[in-house]
Image (spheres, rainbow, N blue to C red):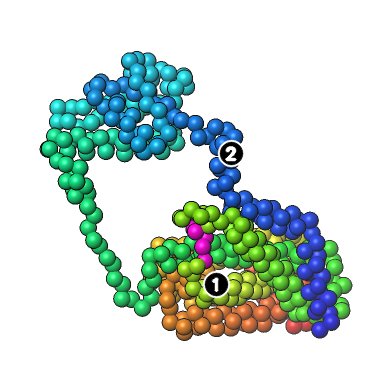
Amino acid sequence: MREFWIIFKQAFTSKAKAKSFIITTLIMMVAIFLLANISKIIDTVQDMTGGEEEEVLHVVDTSGVLIDPLRAQLETEESGIVVKATEESEQELTDKVTSEDIDSFLTLSVDEQGTIHANYTTMSMMDFSLPGRIQDALQSIQTEMKANELSLSGAQVQTLFTPIQFEQQNISPSAKSEEELNTARVLVYVLMFVIYFSVIMYSSMIAMDVANEKSSRVMEILISSVSPVKHMFAKVLGVGSLGILQIIIYGITGFIAFKTSATEIPGGFSDFFSLKDVSPSTLVYAAVFFVLGFFLYATLAALLGSLVSRTEDVQQMIMPMTLLIVAAFIIAATGLGNPEIGYLKYASYFPFFTPLVMFLRVGLLDLPMWEPLLSIAIMLATIFILGWFGARVYRGGVLMYGPSRSLKDIKKAIQLGKE
């Protein structure tokens, strides 16, 4: 076991001390703090750049009766829009918009039926907020005009918009409240990304590390003093432990960042990522499926990495593995809106899809205990089989040199390992 722990320590410390690992970790920690304080940053930038300045809206009111109500309505809503009447023609205003002398203008009129017609002109392709606020204000004015025309009081008008009392009752054993479902959906989506990117990044790291040792002929020295099987699992566990440590660092950083940036405003950014409505079992399953998913793909990556002699061939060799995790992510993502889709149930028992798909289901549904436990058992069996098979391939693969042609090299590696 001494050799095992030496390789384990070397795999862990060499990556942990690498400048790329340290810089990436620091950048991600800074990014997490920036994300947690994004609302404060936006407010600060707006204050510095004058983002809160009032917007001037040039209005051509051909009816002569709408501009004052519109101004009053926008002031009541505190929209930050200043209504400015103008006698210029539409063509003159259009020319000013084209030359960017003004941002936009509005033309108002009323037809014989008392219906308001508004034409908003702008050059901005992303101008959606301002016309939306103007439309809402004009709709309120239209409602008030129609109410006066029908001699309706304010109370009578309000009764026209009284919402119905609608309640939904779900007797399904897997049902959750809308609040619980929304919170769980956000958490599941975030953790799915964590699992997805971690598996791709750390698995590629293992495959690249093995291929790099082969290309530098270091492997020939290593296997003379330690068995290839010990070398393989020491690599997997060493890089895996480093990956888990990095995720824990990100988790602690995120917890501190969101706690220190929490505001009293309900429905704010902190509430969006709140864990108060998340079942503890969901967090436990997230950890379990992350660890199992990592070691499943890491073992496969070590197997594939042992087949190549040049680091340039690593990405091509692990492409099938990458496609598996991408397919798992796509399938899981399709179930965020409806986790009860039939094919998700079957996909959740396929070991290479289980870490994402089964986690999606346990996060959004109250499944019977046997379902996640069965998927965990299938994954453990798959890791054991893949480890046994991978050890046989690895034993011969580390001795293979020359250009890697395809996955057909697995057969050659097994035969070489027997010798």
Do the residues under discs 1 and 2 have CB atoms within 8 angstroms? no
In percent of the image, x 64 and y 74: which residue is there?
295
Q: Earlier in the sequence, mark 1 or mark 2?
A: 2
Labelled disc at residue 45: 2
In percent of the image, x 62 and y 79: which residue is there?
383
Q: Which residues are magenta?
A: 271-275
The answer to whether 161 appears left or right of 329 in the picture is left
| Residue 273 located within the stretch drawn in magenta | yes
| x then y, percent, for residue 222 | 85, 74
| x then y, percent, for residue 196 | 58, 64
The part of the image, by quadrant, that contains residue 59 is top left
The answer to whether 329 appears left or right of 342 in the picture is right
What crowding class fits label 1: few (fewer than 14 Cα within 10 Å), some (14-19), or many (20 or more)? some
Kind of element beneath mark 2: helix
Kind of element beneath mark 1: helix
Labelled disc at residue 382: none
The part of the image, by quadrant, that contains residue 260 is bottom right
| Residue 386 located within the stretch drawn in magenta | no
Q: Amino acid at mark 2?
A: Val
Q: Nearer the viewer, mark 1 or mark 2?
A: 2
**Residue assigned mark 1:** 283
Q: Nearer the viewer, residue 82 or 153?
A: 153
- The answer to whether residue 304 is seen in the rendering is no
In percent of the image, x 37 and y 33: which residue is there?
75
The part of the image, by quadrant, that contains residue 261 is bottom right
What crowding class fits label 2: few (fewer than 14 Cα within 10 Å), some (14-19), or many (20 or more)? few
In percent of the image, x 87 and y 79: which residue is there?
225
Screen quadrant of the C terminus = bottom right
